[in-house]
């Protein structure tokens, strides 16, 4: 079986977000770009499965839809241990566009398990994985917090309200992963970084697909009112404020 | 033309979130001068279904089929897509929770409908149709134009107030045929705690960070939560250390929540933590360090030692509950 891990390229999670061009785009000066945290965990889990010969996972490929400037992030994924990478050479204009490109890649290369993150930390869309599965007409399992292969059969744990469900699903399918899928992201070792240089990154030109959404402008959240302090010796006053001023208890 | 809203039930009851959705749908329908149709899938009795009418649903389509007991993303998508064709829906509303995230994108492809996800205000504009959505984990919001004829909006929890109306809704029972062989996800085992307040839809959350020092100090935090009818949560290091279960971890890589009240005890307020809680209506911070970043996100704060403050808060809440 072959795994495809979809990775998006996002600003490091500590970045102070600023905008440029009349707030129509993000100001990229000084930004460190990283693999979206969820995708990093997906990749880690995919590699753990591959390391286990009994799983029957033969290869782990990463795919990214983005311009040449995201190559370093792809190289990072290869350094962590992905066997090869595919880059669809296009700006990721919207989720619909991105999902259509990924679906096309899967159609042409026949992956069995496609892993997507629950959300990208930039656009917070939470939609690409589900769209890919519907474009392909294959099952999707969402809120996946665990994935194993038992006797060639994928067994997934997914989160439901107030608990968990263990489900089986036949490949090919899309797993939309969240917390729990792997403990800590795997870190690239020196050897991995050296090897990444010679691993193949296949470049694909995009399908002509018309995006369905467009960001017009960004705005910063309204600033919160200044904090009102309550004396540590008199917490009862806090309860009074919450009850009578904020009216939340 | 109509506005279609998928209302999720949990064990036969609608949660506040479903009523928020219907209130929102009613707001959108007013802007468009059209009606609201609510869809419910599962075993919900008539009295409960009627409640959707209190928030403005004109018609309630009730789908009850044993094959739809557990969430099969494809089967649910087919049912909602079929209804949306029948109702000639141009706007489809779903909650931005696990279920919504599972169904909305599939529905999008099925109906060639653009999605605005995590929306927290009524549409900013009808022409072009523009929604207001959370981006960069709450550090920014975007105005997003949806260009397709049919549009899907997933609504952020707790971002829209309930609006009651006195309208009477008609209930229509719909039989759908589900081909069992098309159900692709087979549920092998369910572990569910009933009666527990689910973190993602709690109105009040009491959360502890590394400043709680040791798992042994949690009882007073848990007691405060119980008294307030709140769910408990924690920061990432706390769950990583195994002090608290992983389900409680909030933040960028944990749960993203938006309660009415979030009480952060011994949490510094790192950006990755705030990413999961910044949409809370009110944030309270309790921290020994007056410069901790959490105070910039909070409306109320106590600079003090959690171990001393928590028991006093417990007493104060007991006092008002008397
Ligand atoms: C990619 C990435 C993703 C991440 N995702 C998350 C995430 O999802 N969620 C998350 O929480 N973190 C996340 N983090 C970690 C985050 O950066 C912080 O390290 C973490 O939130 C800190 O947790 P804390 O506030 O509990 O601990 P600390 O930062 O150690 O803060 C403890 C606080 O307690 C206070 N304190 C000490 N003693 C007391 C006392 N007696 N009474 C009251 N207060 C006291 C201190 O003043 C301090 O402010 C992520 C990090 C990375 C790199
Ligand atoms: N440009 C992209 N290239 C490859 N995968 C992507 C891209 N954008 C999003 N994804 C995948 O889709 C997931 C959810 O993204 P989103 O729907 O944008 O929140 C991410 O965690 C990735 O796995």
Image: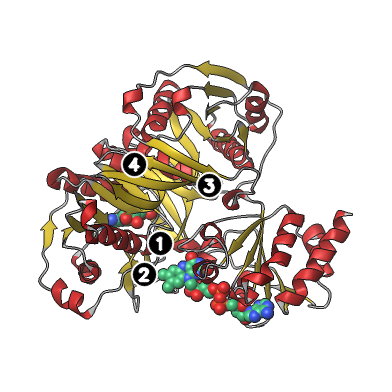
- The earlier-in-sequence mark between 2 and 4 is 2
Report the residue marked by disc 1.
A121
Q: Which residue is mark 2?
A: A11
Mark with earlier residue (4, 3): 4
Residue A212 visible in the current orientation: no
Left or right of residue B98, residue B285 in this image: right
Residue in the foreground of this view, choosing between B172 and B12: B12
Residue position marked by numbered label 3 in the rendering: A163
Quadrant of the rendered image containing residue B113: top left
The residue shown at (47%, 16%) is: B175
Residue B289, position as x, y percentages in the image: 65, 83
Label 1 and label 4: CA atoms lie apart by: 21 Å
- Front residue of this view, candidates B75 and A65: B75
**Is disc 1 surrounded by few (<14), some (14 to 19) or many (20+) residues within 10 Å?**
many
Q: Residue B241's x, y, as percent?
A: 52, 71
Q: Earlier in the sequence, mark 1 or mark 3?
A: 1
Cα distance, mark 2 to mark 1? 8 Å
Residue B231, quarter of picture: bottom right
Q: How many marks?
A: 4
Tell which subunit mark 2 falls on: A
Q: Are marks 4 and 3 on the same chain?
A: yes
Q: Chain of mark 1?
A: A
Q: Are marks 2 and 1 in contact (CB under 8 Å)?
A: yes
Closer to viewer: mark 4 or mark 3? 3
Residue drawn at x 34%, y 44% is A130
Please check whether the numbered discs 1 and 3 fall on a single chain: yes
CA gap, disc 1 to disc 3?
25 Å
């Amino acid at each position: 079986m072959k795994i495809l891990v979809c990775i998006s390229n996002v600003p490091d999670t500590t970045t102070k977000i600023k905008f440029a061009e009349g707030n129509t785009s993000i100001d990229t000066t000084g930004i460190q770009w990283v693999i979206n945290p969820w995708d990093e965990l997906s990749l880690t889990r995919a590699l753990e499965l591959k390391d286990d010969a009994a799983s029957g996972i033969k290869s782990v490929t990463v795919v990214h839809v983005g311009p040449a400037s995201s190559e370093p992030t792809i190289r990072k994924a290869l350094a962590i241990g992905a066997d090869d990478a595919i880059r669809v050479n296009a700006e990721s204009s919207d989720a619909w566009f991105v999902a259509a490109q990924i679906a096309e890649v899967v159609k042409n290369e026949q992956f069995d398990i496609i892993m997507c993150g629950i959300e990208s930390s930039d656009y917070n869309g939470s939609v690409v994985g589900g769209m890919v599965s519907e474009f392909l007409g294959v099952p999707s399992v969402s809120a996946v917090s665990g994935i194993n292969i038992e006797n060639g059969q994928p067994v997934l744990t997914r989160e439901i309200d107030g608990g968990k469900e263990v489900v089986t699903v036949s490949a090919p399918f899309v797993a939309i992963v969240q917390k729990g899928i792997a403990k800590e992201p795997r870190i690239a070792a020196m050897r991995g970084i050296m090897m990444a240089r010679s691993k193949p990154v296949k470049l694909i030109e995009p399908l002509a697909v018309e995006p369905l959404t467009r960001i017009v402008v960004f705005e910063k959240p309204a600033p919160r009112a200044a904090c009102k302090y309550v004396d540590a010796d008199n917490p009862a006053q806090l309860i009074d404020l919450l009850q009578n001023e904020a009216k939340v208890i | 033309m109509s506005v279609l809203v998928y209302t999720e039930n949990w064990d036969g009851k609608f949660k506040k979130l479903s009523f928020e959705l219907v209130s929102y749908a009613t707001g959108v329908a007013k802007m468009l001068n059209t009606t609201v149709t609510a869809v419910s899938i599962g075993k919900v009795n008539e009295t409960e279904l009627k409640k959707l009418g209190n928030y403005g649903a004109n018609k309630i389509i009730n789908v009850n089929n044993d094959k739809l007991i557990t969430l099969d993303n494809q089967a649910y998508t087919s049912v909602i897509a079929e209804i949306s064709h029948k109702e000639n829906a141009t706007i489809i509303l779903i909650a931005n929770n696990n279920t919504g995230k599972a169904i909305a994108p599939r529905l999008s492809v099925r109906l060639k409908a653009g999605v605005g996800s995590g929306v927290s205000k009524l549409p900013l504009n009808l022409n072009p149709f523009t929604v207001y959505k959370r981006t960069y984990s709450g550090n920014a919001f975007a105005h997003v134009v949806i260009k397709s004829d049919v549009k899907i909006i997933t609504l952020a929890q707790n971002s829209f107030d309930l609006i009651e109306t006195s309208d009477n809704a008609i209930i229509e029972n719909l039989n759908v045929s589900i081909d069992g062989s098309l159900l692709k996800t087979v549920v092998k085992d369910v572990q569910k705690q009933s009666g527990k307040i689910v973190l993602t839809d709690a109105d009040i959350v009491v959360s502890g960070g590394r400043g709680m020092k040791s798992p042994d100090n949690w009882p007073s935090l848990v007691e405060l939560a119980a008294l307030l009818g709140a769910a408990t949560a924690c920061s990432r290091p706390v769950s990583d250390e195994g002090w608290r279960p992983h389900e409680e971890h909030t933040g960028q890589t944990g749960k993203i929540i938006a309660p009415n009240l979030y009480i952060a005890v011994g949490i510094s307020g790192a950006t990755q933590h705030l990413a999961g809680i910044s949409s809370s209506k009110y944030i309270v911070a309790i921290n020994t360090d007056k410069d901790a970043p959490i105070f910039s996100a909070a409306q109320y704060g106590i600079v003090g030692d959690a171990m001393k403050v928590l028991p006093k808060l417990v007493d104060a809440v007991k006092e008002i509950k008397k």
